[in-house]
Amino acid sequence: MDWGMKNRFSRIIKPQDGRCLMLAVDHGYFLGPTERLENATETIRPLLPYADSLMLTRGILRNCVPAERDIPIVLRVSGGTSIVGEDLSKETITTSIEEAIKLNVSCLALSIFVGSKYEHQTLASLGRLVDEGEKYGIPVLAVTAVGKEMGRDARYLALACRVAAELGAHIVKTYYCDNFEKVVEACPVPLVVAGGKKLPEMDALKLAYDSVSHGAAGVDMGRNIWQSDYPVPMIKAVKAIVHNKATVKEAYDVFMRERQKMKQKKPQEIVKTVSSSGDFD
């Protein structure tokens, strides 16, 4: 890696501990207004101080994230389908490398659908994106998306992750599964685990703990943070696992303490906190 690539990569995977807490807010690119992400600005603002990076589209970045905030951006550049369309796997590259450079992003993200009808199309797109990223020193994150017919077992995920790495992906986002160590061992680049559907807080924290304990570099959580009734306490609890090596119980204690603090605030204090992005620490 040259200096620029190393510098951007270090903004995503923190060199101090080799870990990352990515906040996923890119769901609208195929789901439209997602529950509790309808107003993306209000959802993102209170979580910014606690995320290592944001994964999102250029539209949400431009319109919902203050340019003055120093937050590394993982820019989703694939799409072209929606939840009401023919097939979610029929994705292509939707954002140019010039656009990514203008937006000063730290990483590019693209989904691949190994084993799907459009496998070739998405894998070829990954290869082209890696070429473009290498040219300008921007790392690429490949998302091993799965369709309804594809499982999430170690055999399939190891295949998908290895293919992504073979095609040049610098980071791979995948799912946690039984025997996750086999997926990690087969992939020569860092793995980040997707949060997936909304779970009870304890279960989501266990997912984060199991992921990093079995070799993942971190997590890319969205719904399990901002669909919680207490998103800020939740992201703090996840961060305790990812960066402070907290156990599930210790992280849940963090969640409960922070939740209690929020409950004790007067209504006007809560409004003030949510409305001022400079007051979070």
Image (tube, grey):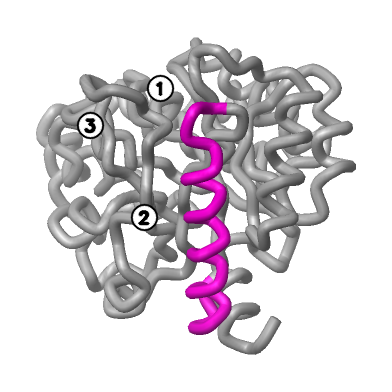
Residue 43 occupies quadrant: top left
Q: What residue is disc 2 on?
A: 93
Residue at horizontal 62 percent and vertical 70 percent from the top: 10
Under circle 1, the secondary element is helix
Residue sitting nearer the eye, 70 or 40: 40
Residue 281 visible, this angle:
no
Q: What residue is disc 3 on?
A: 37
C-alpha gap between disc 1 and disc 3 = 24 Å
Residue type at tag 3: Leu
Image position of 75 (left or right of 144)? left
Estimate the x, y position of residue 2 in percent, counting from the top left: 66, 87
Q: Is residue 229 magenta?
A: no
**In the rendered view, would you say 45 is above or below 180?**
below
Under circle 2, the secondary element is strand
Residue sitting nearer the eye, 216 or 251: 216
Nearer-N-terminus badge (3/2): 3
Residue at horizontal 37 percent and vertical 49 percent from the top: 92
Nearer-N-terminus badge (2/1): 2
Task: Characterize the local packing of mark 2: few (<14), some (14-19) or many (20 or more) Cα atoms within 10 angstroms.
Answer: many
Image position of 222 (left or right of 124)? left
Secondary structure mostly seen in magenta is helix
C-alpha gap between disc 3 and disc 2 = 24 Å
Residue at horizontal 35 percent and vertical 25 percent from the top: 87
Q: What residue is disc 1 on?
A: 260
Residue at horizontal 67 percent and vertical 62 percent from the top: 168
**In the rendered view, would you say 200 is above or below 220?**
above
Q: Does the magenta stretch include residue 136?
A: yes
Image depth: mark 3 or mark 2 in front = 2
Residue numbers of the magenta segment: 116-138
Residue type at tag 2: Ile
